[in-house]
Image (spheres, rainbow, N blue to C red):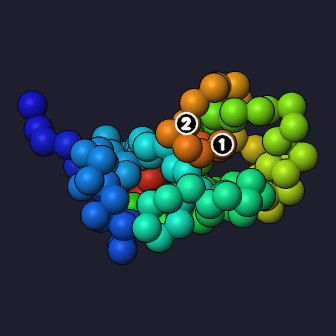
């Protein structure tokens, strides 16, 4: 069995080392991205919810880019929400800006009661473009 092909965005390696996980794993032409949260540079949660969601999408964009991918390559999305009913109005504009026009990736939203101090998390599976 081969070792995992781990992907890390520039500048955040220490956060992954501290928490002992990879930002993403490449397997063949698929990229499995760990849940991304709206953390500030020091790893702490951004207190403003809309900004926290934007940072989570920014962090996701950086992980995708480290593997030669973009939001256009995402095929599966799972999001976790501490208060889905009240949070969706803040999430939708950020989500639509990131994913552009249809066709959209499939999406599963899960309500949870704990995200280690965060209120939103997004994880994805993307297909790695041939050029990457």
Q: Badge 2, how many Cα within 10 Å: few under 14, some, many 20+?
A: few
Image coordinates for residue 84, horizontal then vertical, percent = 79, 32
Image coordinates for residue 129, horizontal then vertical, percent = 47, 57
Q: Badge 1, how many Cα within 10 Å: few under 14, some, many 20+?
A: many
Q: Is residue 93 found left or right of 30 in the rendered image?
A: right
Q: Residue furthest left?
A: 1
Instruction: Judge by depth and name the residue closer to the eye, 107 or 36.
Output: 36
**Residue 48 visible in rendering:** yes
Circle 2 residue: 115
Disc 1 vs disc 2: Cβ atoms closer than 8 Å? yes
Circle 1 residue: 119
Q: Which quadrant is home to the C terminus? A: bottom left
Q: Secondary structure at mark 1?
A: loop
Q: Is residue 89 found left or right of 62 in the rendered image?
A: right
Q: Is residue 46 above or below residue 3?
A: below
Q: Is residue 49 found left or right of 34 in the rendered image?
A: right
Q: Is residue 94 above or below residue 87?
A: below
Instruction: Judge by depth and name the residue closer to the eye, 29 or 40.
Output: 40
Residue drawn at 43 percent across, 43 percent down: 34
Image coordinates for residue 63, horizontal then vertical, percent = 45, 60
Q: Is residue 102 above or below residue 100?
A: above
Q: Is residue 13 found left or right of 126 in the rendered image?
A: left
The span from disc 1 to disc 2 (Cα, nearest Å) is 6 Å
Residue drawn at 86 percent across, 31 percent down: 85
């Amino acid at each position: 069995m081969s070792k995992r092909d781990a992907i890390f965005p520039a500048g955040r390696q220490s956060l992954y080392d501290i928490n002992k996980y990879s930002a993403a794993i490449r397997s063949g032409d698929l990229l499995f991205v760990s849940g991304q949260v709206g953390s500030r540079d020091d790893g702490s949660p951004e207190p403003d919810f809309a900004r926290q969601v934007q940072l989570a999408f920014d962090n996701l964009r950086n992980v995708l880019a480290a593997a030669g991918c973009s939001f256009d390559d995402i095929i599966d999305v799972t999001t976790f929400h501490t208060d889905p009913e009240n949070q969706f109005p803040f999430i939708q504009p950020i989500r639509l800006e990131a994913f552009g026009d249809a066709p959209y990736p499939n999406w599963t939203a899960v309500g949870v009661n704990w995200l280690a101090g965060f209120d939103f998390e997004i994880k994805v599976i993307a297909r790695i473009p041939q050029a990457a």
